[in-house]
Amino acid sequence: MSIAPSDEPQLPDENQLILNRARVYVLVRTAVDGLLLAILFLEPPAINAVWLYAILLADLAGLGIYWLAIRKWPAASTYFELIVTALLIFAAEIAIGNIVVASWLLLLPLGLAGGLIIARPGFNSLVTLSLLVILGVYVGLIVLNYIPLPRALPINQIIAAAIAISLVLIVQNALIETLAVHLFQTQQDLVQTQVQLLHAQAELESSQSELYDAERQTRRLERLSAIGQIANQVSRSLRAPLIDIRDTLALPPEALTQPTTLSKLNAELDNALHMLQGLQNFTALGQAQLQNVNLDDVVSAEISSLELPEGVALRVEQPPVFPPIQADPKQMRLLLRNLVDNAVQAVRVDGGQIIVRLMLATEGVRLSVHDTGPGIPEERMKMIFEPLFTTRPDSFGLGLAVCQQILRMHGGRISVSSEKGKGTTFEVYLPRVPRHPAEELAEDMAA
């Protein structure tokens, strides 16, 4: 069985992961800008409101452009979006007309976003370095009075704040870069593992193909072997009665009319037909036609049709009320016929007794056939259910194999116990309802 394509190892698409993380970033940023626009609309500041509106709208426009560009240039578009956002933060501070050191803290989430969106070694360091350069240039312009803004804090405190934010950015970048390297290495390991799995899968499918060919060849050889065994068994079993019939027919015409000769011919023909019927029973087993069957009625009908040899007695034991089961009535009769026929053959020579018992069982019924014959030697016990195994010259050895197949089709089972000199008992268990649909049972039997 080959591995289905849906079962092959799959790594998540990196571009799709970047797109999903960028979507979260854009949604959060859009929500923040929208909230700031609403605040400006409800409570506009005293000065430079137009510039603040323009900066926020420019930020929203930049987010839109970023969302359009990220599918084609994920790393470049993310880098420029973060840098432009940092520039807009300082532009907003200039628009307000005052140095607000707290706004510089917004550089921290920008540095964090760089490593979270594009989780590649080196990318977050590039973003962090660029943010540090922008912050350094901006603070330098303030110190040199190129940006004439009122200073709510002494210049040394402004420089200290910038240095502190820079240090936090550097530490944060180290952590993000470590995480990015780990994720990158993990992804590489996953890619390598996937390649190994694909190679292993290819080798497995090749091995399975070779195994399938070998199994097909083995089944073909088994079929040829089975055909050979059957042909040999047919030849061996039918040869003797056919020779007897030929020799009998070679007698003078007046001898053929003698009752003893006709009786001998009929006996040999009956033996041959009996063996052929056993072969037909084995090959003709098909799908079980399940219906409600009263097993006690099947036993009564089959027993009443038997012609027992002289010296053989048969007794049926059953409870007064016996529940019906789901089974094929023809196959139940064939099952019972083969079991009783085996028992008859065991006691035919010296005479004896056969006992057929019907018993209730958990979720089913039991049927046993006991004979008082000589018993089965222990070395043959493991072989009696094998097709073509027989110790009788007038049999193909298919009766018990047929019984076993019938029970498989009905979800039942058969066991045997035997004691030398005391007889043999075959016990059958049948569920009231087969555990599998009839089609599955037929397929299982065919397999």
Image (spheres, rainbow, N blue to C red):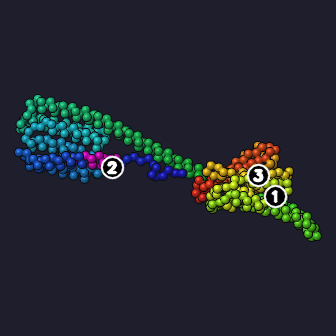
Q: Look at the image and tell me whether residue 315 can be seen.
A: yes
Task: Name the main secondary structure of what is drawn in magenta.
Answer: helix
**Does 151 sit above or below residue 68?**
above
- Whichever of callouts 1 and 2 sits on the residue coming sooner in the sequence is 2
Circle 3 — which element?
strand
Locate residue 376, reporting x and y percent. 78, 46
Q: Quadrant of the rendered structure where residue 130 is?
A: top left
Residue linked to disc 1: 308
**Does 112 sit above or below residue 313?**
above
Three-letter amino acid code of the residue under disc 2: Gln
Q: For this rendering, which residue is in front, 314 or 421?
A: 314
Q: For this rendering, which residue is in front, 276 or 303?
A: 303
Q: Is residue 141 magenta?
A: no
Three-letter amino acid code of the residue under disc 1: Leu
Of circles 1 and 3, the one toward us is 3
Measure how far apart labels 1 and 3 are at the Cα level. 13 Å
Measure how far apart labels 3 and 2 are at the Cα level. 76 Å
- Whichever of callouts 3 and 2 sits on the residue coming sooner in the sequence is 2
Residue linked to disc 2: 16
Three-letter amino acid code of the residue under disc 3: Ile
Residue linked to disc 3: 355
Q: Which residues are magenta?
A: 14-26
| Residue 152 left/right relative to 202 | left
What residue do we see at 16% from left, 33% from top?
A: 162
Question: Are the residues flagged by discs 1 and 3 in contact, CB closer than 8 Å?
Answer: no
Measure how far apart labels 1 and 2 are at the Cα level. 82 Å
Q: Residue furthest front?
A: 320
| Residue 287 left/right relative to 168 | right
Circle 2 — which element?
helix
User: Mark 3: few, some, or many residues within 10 Å (few <14, many ≥20)?
Assistant: some
What residue do we see at 13% from left, 36% from top?
A: 101
Locate residue 333, reporting x and y percent. 71, 59
